[in-house]
C-alpha cells in the first residue's frame, strides 16, 4: 500500500510517497508563509502532485497548529498567519480524489513511533518532542488521542515556576542563558563542567515534566524526539534523579519505559500514519 505523508512547516512543505515504511518518492517546496490562504493551499497541492499517483490509498498531513476534527478545518497554524479556518481536508479530497487526514505535528510524531518506531511494543505511550519548545502526542489503546482541536498533550504549556514547563524543559532553557544548545552540547560532551551542569539542570526540569505525564496518564512508555532529545545522555542523569527522588508513586515510575526516537524522517512517516490509523491498519 502506498500512502503520502506531508509535513507542513513555516519555511517548507515536505511530501513523501511511502510504501511499507520506506520513502519511494519525495518533494519539498518553500512555504509561501506570508501569502493568502489560497496561495498557501495551492503551493501545498503542487508539492503533493510531484509524489502523487492513482494507486495512493490516502494522504496524511501534519501541521504546526490546531485542527478541528469535527469540521475538518485547520486552525491557527504557527508561522502561517493566513491559514485560519482552512477546510484543508475537503479541498484536497476534492482535488486528489483520495481520503485526506490532518492533525497536529506533535500528534503525528507519536503516531509515527507507533507504526514505525519505538512505540511498536506499547499500547499506551506518550511521544514527547523536545526542541525549541515541548510538544506531545498521546497514544491510547493503539490509537491516537487528539482531544478537542488536536490540543491534547500540551504539557509544555503548564505553568511552572515563574513561566511554563517548556521554558525550562526545552531549548528555550539555553536561549534564556544566551547560549546555543548545539554549542553547549559539544562543550558538555567534552567535559566542560558548566555546560554539563546546565544539561543536568534541564534534565531535572524534563524529569518533572515526565512526572506530570505520569500523574495525568500513567503510560507504559515515554518516547523522546526532537533536537534536544539527541542530547539525551547529557540530561538523562538529572531527569532520573528527579523521578527517583521526587516522584511519589515509584511503582508508576519503575514500570515506565523511556526511549529516544531513532526514526529517520519521523515527520513524514508520522503524517502518513494518520492514514494507517484511520483505516485500522
Image (spheres, grey):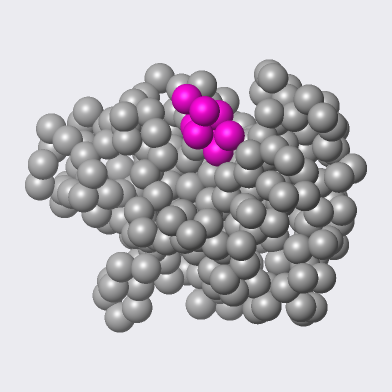
At x 42%, y 61%, the residue is 149
In the image, residue 268 above or below residue 175: above
Q: Looking at the magenta stretch, what is its main secondary structure?
A: helix
- Residue 140 in percent (x, y) is at 32, 35
In the image, residue 249 above or below residue 170: above
Return the residue nearer the eye: 42 or 103.
42
| Magenta stretch encompasses residue 29 | no
Return the residue nearer the eye: 99 or 222.
99
At x 64%, y 58%, the residue is 88
Tell me, yes or no, if residue 173 can be seen here.
yes
Tell me, yes or no, if residue 171 can be seen here.
no
At x 65%, y 72%, the residue is 83
> Would you say 36 lies left or right of 269 here?
right
Q: Quadrant of residue 169?
A: bottom left
Q: Quadrant of residue 221?
A: top left
> Would you say 228 lies left or right of 206 here?
right
Split into 4 quadrants, where in the image is the N terminus?
A: top right
Magenta range is 273-280
> Would you say 184 lies left or right of 167 here?
right
- Residue 39 in percent (x, y) is at 81, 70
- Residue 247 in percent (x, y) is at 16, 48
| Magenta stretch encompasses residue 276 | yes
At x 50%, y 34%, the residue is 278
Return the residue nearer the eye: 141 or 42.
42
Q: Residue furthest left?
A: 248
Number of residue marks: 0
Return the residue nearer the eye: 180 or 224.
224
In the image, residue 253 above or below residue 85: above
- Residue 229 in percent (x, y) is at 52, 47
Amino acid at each position: 500500500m502506498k500512502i503520502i505523508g506531508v509535513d507542513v512547516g513555516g519555511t517548507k512543505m515536505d511530501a513523501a510517497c511511502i510504501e511499507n515504511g520506506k520513502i519511494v518518492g519525495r518533494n519539498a517546496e518553500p512555504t509561501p508563509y506570508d501569502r493568502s490562504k489560497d496561495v498557501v493551499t495551492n503551493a501545498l497541492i503542487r508539492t503533493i502532485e510531484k509524489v502523487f499517483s492513482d494507486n495512493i490509498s490516502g494522504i496524511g498531513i501534519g501541521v504546526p497548529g490546531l485542527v478541528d476534527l469535527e469540521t475538518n478545518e485547520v486552525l491557527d497554524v504557527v508561522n502561517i498567519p493566513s491559514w485560519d479556518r482552512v477546510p484543508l481536508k475537503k479541498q484536497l479530497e476534492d482535488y486528489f480524489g483520495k481520503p485526506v487526514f490532518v492533525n497536529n505535528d506533535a500528534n503525528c510524531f507519536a503516531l509515527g513511533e507507533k507504526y514505525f518506531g519505538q512505540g511498536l511494543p506499547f499500547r499506551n505511550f506518550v511521544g514527547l518532542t523536545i526542541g525549541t519548545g515541548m510538544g506531545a502526542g498521546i497514544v491510547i489503546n493503539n490509537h491516537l488521542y487528539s482531544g478537542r482541536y488536536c490540543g491534547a498533550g500540551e504539557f509544555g504549556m503548564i505553568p511552572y515556576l515563574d513561566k511554563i514547563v517548556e521554558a525550562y524543559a526545552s531549548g528555550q532553557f539555553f536561549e534564556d542563558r544566551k547560549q546555543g544548545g548545539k554549542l553547549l552540547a559539544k562543550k558538555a560532551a567534552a567535559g566542560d563542567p558548566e555546560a554539563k551542569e546546565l544539561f543536568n539542570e534541564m534534565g531535572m526540569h524534563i524529569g518533572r515534566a515526565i512526572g506530570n505525564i505520569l500523574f495525568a496518564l500513567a503510560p507504559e512508555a515515554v518516547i523522546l524526539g526532537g533536537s534536544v532529545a539527541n542530547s539525551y545522555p547529557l540530561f538523562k542523569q538529572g531527569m532520573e534523579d528527579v523521578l527517583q527522588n521526587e516522584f511519589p508513586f515509584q511503582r508508576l515510575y519503575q514500570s515506565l519505559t523511556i526511549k529516544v526516537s531513532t526514526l529517520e524522517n519521523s515527520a513524514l512517516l508520522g503524517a502518513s500514519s494518520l492514514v494507517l490509523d484511520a483505516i485500522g491498519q
